[in-house]
Image (cartoon, grey):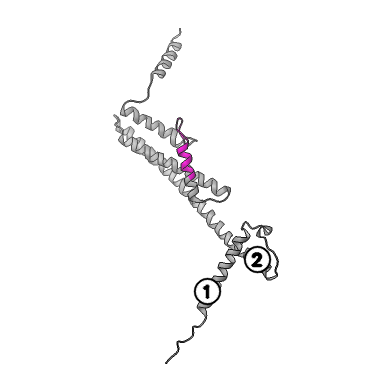
Amino acid sequence: MSATAVRIEANRINAQSSTGPRTEEGKARASLNALRHGITAKSPVLPGESRDPYEKFQHKFVAGLAPSGEVETRLARNMADLQWRIRRCQSLHLDVLKATVTEPLQQVDALNKLALYEQRLTRTFLANMKEFRTLQTERAQREVIDIQDAANRLKLCQSKQLPYDPAEDGFVFSKQQVEDFVRRRDRLTEAAKASESPQPLPATA
C-alpha cells in the first residue's frame, strides 16, 4: 500500500472515531465554524438543524408586518431571514465570550468579525424596512384615493337608482366596504356642519 493510501485510510479511521470538540478551545473553534457557515451561508438553517423553529419565526414575523402583494411579502420574508441571522450572531457572540481559549487574540478577532457581520445585517435589515414602510405608505394613500372615488361613484348611482359594483371599475373593495365608508363620511360631514352652525343663545329670565 502506498504512503498516500495509508494516510487516506488513517484519516478515514480518525474521522469515524471523532466525536467533535471536547475542550473549551475546541468548542470556541466550532463556534467560529458556525459563524462562517451559519451567518454568511445561503440557507439560514444550518445542516442538521430542524427548519421548524425558523419557519415558525418567519411566519410570525411576516404576519406581524401584514404585507400586501408580492413585493411587500418578499421584503417581509427577507427581513425575517435577516433578523434570524442577527439573532444567531448575538448567540454566537455569547458563545465566544464564554469559551476559554488559549489564544485571546483569536477570541478578539472572532468578536470583531461577529460585530462586523451584525452591523452589515442590521444595515441591510433597516434598508429593507425603510423600503417596506414606503411601499405600505404609498399603498395606504392609493387606497384612500380609490375608496373615495368608489364612494363618489356609488353615491352617483344611488342618486339615479342604479346598481353599483366596485369590481366593474377595477376596485378591490367590496360593495359593503364602500357603503360603510360612505356612511362614515356622511356622519363626519354632518358632525362638521353641526359644529359650525351657530348655537342659540340661552334664554334670559
Image coordinates for residue 31, horizontal then vertical, percent: 37, 32
44 left or right, relative to 144 = left
Image coordinates for residue 39, horizontal then vertical, percent: 44, 37
Image coordinates for residue 61, horizontal then vertical, percent: 47, 46
Image coordinates for residue 66, horizontal then vertical, percent: 51, 51
- Residue at (45% x, 30% y) in the render: 48
- Residue at (46% x, 39% y) in the render: 54
Q: Secondary structure under badge 2?
A: helix
Q: Residues within 10 Å of mark 2 (few under 14, many from 20)?
A: many
Q: Which residues are magenta?
A: 44-59
Label at residue 86: none
Residue type at mark 2 is: Leu
Which residue has dot 2 on it? 154
Label at residue 191: 1
- Residue at (66% x, 57% y) in the render: 167
- Residue at (43% x, 33% y) in the render: 36
